[in-house]
Image: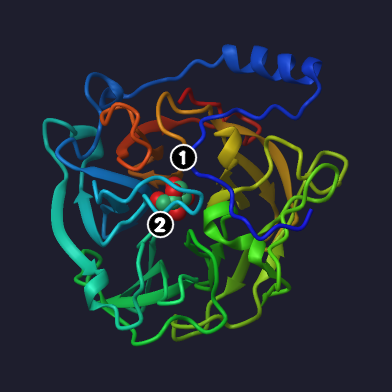
Amino acid sequence: MSSTSFYPYVAKTNIIYLPLSTRQAELAKLKNIKTKNTKIMEGKHYLVPEDYMADPSVHVWNDRLYIYPSHDWESGVPENDNGDHFNMKDYHVFSTDDIEAFPTTPLTDHGVVLSVEDIPWAGRQLWDCDVQEKDGKYYMYFPLKDRNDIFRFGVAVADRPEGPFVPQPAPMRGSYSIDSAVFKDDDGQCYFYFGGIWGGQLQRYKDNKALENAYLPEGDEPALPSRVARLADDMLEFAEDPRPVIIVDENGEPLKANNPYRFFEASWMHKYNGKYYLSYSTGDTHYICYAIADNPYGPFTYQGVVLTPVKAGWTTHHCIVEFKGRWYLFHHDSVPSGGKTWLRSLKVCELHYRADGTIETIEG
Ligand code: FUB
């Protein structure tokens, strides 16, 4: 399929591509989900009840947990096919040294740490950012449309995890699309995962070059993959050309475009027992899924669903992090705004592994 149009972020449709029998088996499995909650899951567990925050990226530095979300607001931009209604203009940072003490002890809000007006090349729309540390400096990677309405990634640098972050004068060379996740491996190398289809513009690129016409695979064609590139020593540029992140099924075949569990956006990488866990949103089918590899580039073997579709809102977006001996899933939904998909709220719950390293599915 060749198309120059960009697909809507507006319709809440679950597109079911699997044969009905497979789908029924999957649903039966999901019905057996038992979510084990720690006390933060009891009662009201929206982490920032006074504001709209989404797309969490979370890291632990110096025994403190830092949350880097997108900051949703009511900008008045109508919903359209490009996701223009996600018109975010700044980032806050939140932190805590005891997430289990929430809500008795609220998160610390470090305020606005980067604004669109401070970014020299800015057009509009600050979407999902991530932060990584190297040699005592903190690097924030943010997707932003430039003045030609093309998503690029910028880098902003701080001396402390809570910012403020000072943007570099220009976007990263060769960067495109959205949703940064920067993983630091045990040897100190950092890997930059990115990409998102539809409004995230990934379908406009092939082999890291802009296409004349956007191309979104369909049917039995291999699904459009996210991308990964190792970061340069200075953390400001890619050290190599981005590579496709291939997810394969149990037979080693790449997931196809018509598979409801294929990649759409919101990459996240974490390591557990020496294995690399890639998790991501399936977008229009509304799951968070995961796949495992023995190295940061993959190929990754598909494993299953981490989070079933959330109760309100089109998007689903998450991260997985270990803090003080427990594993957590941070994510968002649009329940508090009454289903406005551009006004999302942050949540957290505990995540559990089975003995074989697979993740127990959590109910959205
Ligand atoms: O927040 C804007 C976009 O919505 C993000 O970049 C996507 O991952 C989705 O959550």
User: From the viewer's perspective, is 129 left or right of 244?
Assistant: left
In this figure, which colouring scheme has been used for the structure? rainbow
Q: Which residue is mark 1?
A: 315
Does any atom of ligand 1 lie closer than 8 Å to the CB of label 1? Answer: yes
Does any atom of ligand 1 lie closer than 8 Å to the CB of label 2? Answer: yes
Q: Earlier in the sequence, mark 1 or mark 2?
A: 2
For the residues marked 1 and 2, what is the alpha-carbon distance in whole angstroms? 12 Å
Looking at the rendered structure, the kind of residue marked 1 is Thr
Q: Residue, x 22% and y 57% (percent of image)?
A: 92
Q: Position of residue 208 (x, y in %)?
A: 67, 75
Circle 1 packing at 10 Å, graded few (<14), some (14-19), many (20+), is many
Residue 128 bears which disc, if any?
A: 2
Quarter assignment of residue 123: bottom left
Q: Position of residue 228 (x, y in %)?
A: 62, 66
Up-down relation of residue 304 to residue 234 (above or below): above
Q: Residue, x 78% and y 17% (percent of image)?
A: 20
Of residue 194 and residue 235, the one placed in the foreground of this image is: 194
Looking at the rendered structure, the kind of residue marked 2 is Asp
Of residue 282 and residue 351, the one placed in the foreground of this image is: 282
Q: How many marks?
A: 2
